[in-house]
Image (cartoon, rainbow, N blue to C red):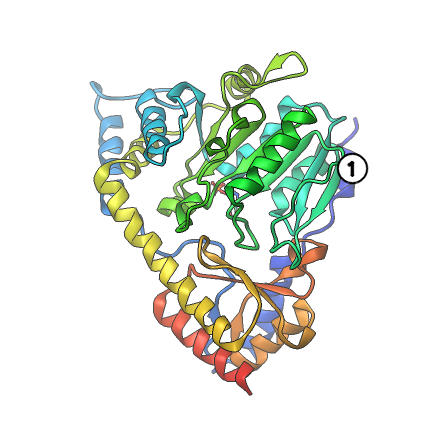
């Protein structure tokens, strides 16, 4: 009996444990201080009313013989896949319902997609990075190369013709940096992938936060259907972090190594996944209804306003940052050349505000810091007031 020794190659991720430890120690020593957490990557607003109604109705259906549902389709019910296809049409992107696979979220799909690829492939990720891309490929024993996102490229890493990669993870708008690729930048990645026979795994989990004229989907780029798979999620779009629903798009025409990737993923899902529950798919479909869109946009606007409050303060303080405009994340340069953890302690002790040290997301995160707009308005305003007071000194 042997275990998967690739797991020994995982770098222990102390980030959130270390944040919790330092925060708890602080509270133990300063029980009367009020801490504000701007480090959370989870949403705080409740589900939209139409979504809750649809979920309740879905649950009622399961309680009646005439409307009871058993195992769902592996790829999701047609009505939800069609609603997703129509949603894409709304921003001018053509994705057909039979290219959509409904899932329990983007994290699972980003991690599981590797099942259809050989362990011999070289994987490229941008650094800093959402850790799931790295860890799931280390578990599979794949070689990983890094493309640097840094201040010089506005935290938008671009392809390098001298670097050979077979699988490329891109995330736009990005977690953790909040930067979002332009049409021209994404076109460069698409051209690189098509030329080098690579596949782009495009994570669009934050597309709903885009406010400027930037691509909401990689399929807004010519040539993407022959090289890209897209993941998306209702977690941040509609507050589904606890409800669990996402989707993956694999174009019917996407082929590599003599195989059709849509067919391979269908086979994989049919073997290892038994679909998303009826009430959750009903709730997800409600997100894409006219009223659903109106209601979820109110929640997104709330987070966007928080982001604006944070980024306006950084503008005032003259601190470099990316994100905030097209993303719930604000990625800032630690003032006075402080290290990430040094700034974490400084903010915690002096302003009683908790954020996320950038180095937890990769080497290029050292010296940077992530704040999020998922808190509530009052706390965000108060945290920003404290940060301004501290850093103006
Ligand atoms: N992709 C990115 C870039 C994320 O930041 C997250 C969550 O933080 C996810 C995917 C996970 O999405 P889901 O909740 O759908 O699994």
Examine the rendering and report whether any part of residue 72 can be seen: no
Examine the rendering and report whether any part of residue 256 can be seen: yes
Measuring 63% from the left and 64% from the top, which residue is drawn there? 368
Q: Residue furthest front?
A: 184
Q: Residue furthest top?
A: 258
**Where is the C terminus found, in terms of image quarters?**
bottom right
Q: Residue furthest bottom?
A: 393
**In the picture shown, does residue 268 fall above or below 43?**
above
Q: Observer-nearest residue: 54 or 169? A: 169
Q: Is mark 1 within 8 Å of ligand 1?
A: no
**In the picture shown, does residue 8 fall above or below 334?**
above
**Where is the N terminus found, in terms of image quarters?**
top right
For the image, the number of numbered tags is 1
Residue 322, given in percent of the width and then of the height, sits at 54, 59
Query: Would you call the spot at circle 1 few (<14 residues within 10 Å), some (14-19), or many (20 or more)?
Result: few
- Indicate left or right for 3 with 23 as reference: right
Q: Secondary structure at mark 1?
A: loop
**In the picture shown, does residue 116 fall above or below 385?**
above
Please give the residue where the numbered disc 1 appears in the rendered image.
Answer: 162
Tell me the quarter of the picture where residue 363 sits.
bottom right
Residue 180, given in percent of the width and then of the height, sits at 52, 49
Q: Observer-nearest residue: 200 or 134? A: 200
Residue 223, given in percent of the width and then of the height, sits at 54, 26
Measuring 21% from the left and 41% from the top, which residue is drawn there? 291
- Indicate left or right for 257 with 23 as reference: right
Residue 334, given in percent of the width and then of the height, sits at 62, 70
- Indicate left or right for 114 with 375 as reference: right
Tell me the quarter of the picture where residue 356 sits.
bottom right
């Amino acid at each position: 009996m042997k275990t998967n020794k690739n797991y020994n190659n995982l770098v222990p991720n102390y980030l959130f444990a270390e944040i919790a430890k330092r925060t708890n120690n602080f509270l133990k020593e300063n029980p009367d201080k009020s801490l504000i957490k701007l480090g959370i990557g989870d949403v705080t607003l409740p589900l939209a009313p139409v979504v809750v109604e649809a979920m309740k109705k879905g649950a009622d259906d399961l309680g009646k013989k005439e409307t009871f549902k058993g195992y769902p389709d592996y790829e999701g019910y047609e009505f939800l896949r069609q609603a997703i296809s129509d949603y894409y049409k709304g921003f001018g992107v053509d994705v057909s319902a039979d290219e959509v696979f409904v899932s329990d979220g983007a994290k699972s799909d980003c991690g599981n997609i590797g099942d259809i690829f050989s362990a011999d492939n070289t994987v490229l990720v941008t650094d800093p990075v959402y850790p799931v891309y790295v860890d799931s490929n280390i578990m599979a024993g794949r070689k990983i190369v890094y493309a640097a996102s840094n201040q010089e490229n506005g935290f938008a890493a671009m392809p390098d013709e001298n670097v050979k990669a077979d699988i490329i993870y891109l995330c736009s708008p990005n977690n953790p940096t909040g930067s979002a690729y332009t049409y021209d930048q994404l076109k460069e990645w698409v051209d690189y992938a098509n030329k080098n026979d690579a596949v782009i795994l495009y994570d669009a989990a934050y597309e709903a936060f885009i406010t400027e004229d930037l691509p909401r989907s990689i399929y807004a780029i010519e040539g993407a259907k022959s090289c890209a798979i897209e993941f998306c999620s209702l977690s941040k779009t509609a507050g589904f972090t606890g409800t669990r629903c996402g989707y993956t798009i694999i174009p019917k025409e996407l082929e590599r190594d003599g195989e059709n990737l849509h067919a391979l993923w269908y086979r994989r899902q049919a073997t290892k996944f038994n679909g998303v529950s009826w009430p959750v798919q009903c709730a997800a479909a409600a997100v894409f209804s006219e009223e659903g869109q109106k209601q979820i946009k109110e929640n997104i606007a709330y987070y966007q306003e928080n982001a604006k409050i944070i980024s306006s303060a950084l503008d005032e303080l003259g601190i470099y940052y990316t994100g905030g405009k097209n993303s719930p994340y604000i990625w800032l340069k630690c003032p006075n050349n402080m290290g990430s953890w040094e700034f974490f302690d400084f903010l915690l002790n002096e302003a009683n505000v908790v954020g996320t040290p950038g180095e937890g997301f990769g080497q290029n995160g050292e010296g940077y810091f992530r704040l999020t707009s998922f808190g509530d308005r009052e706390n965000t305003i108060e945290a920003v007031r404290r940060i301004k007071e501290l850093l103006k000194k």
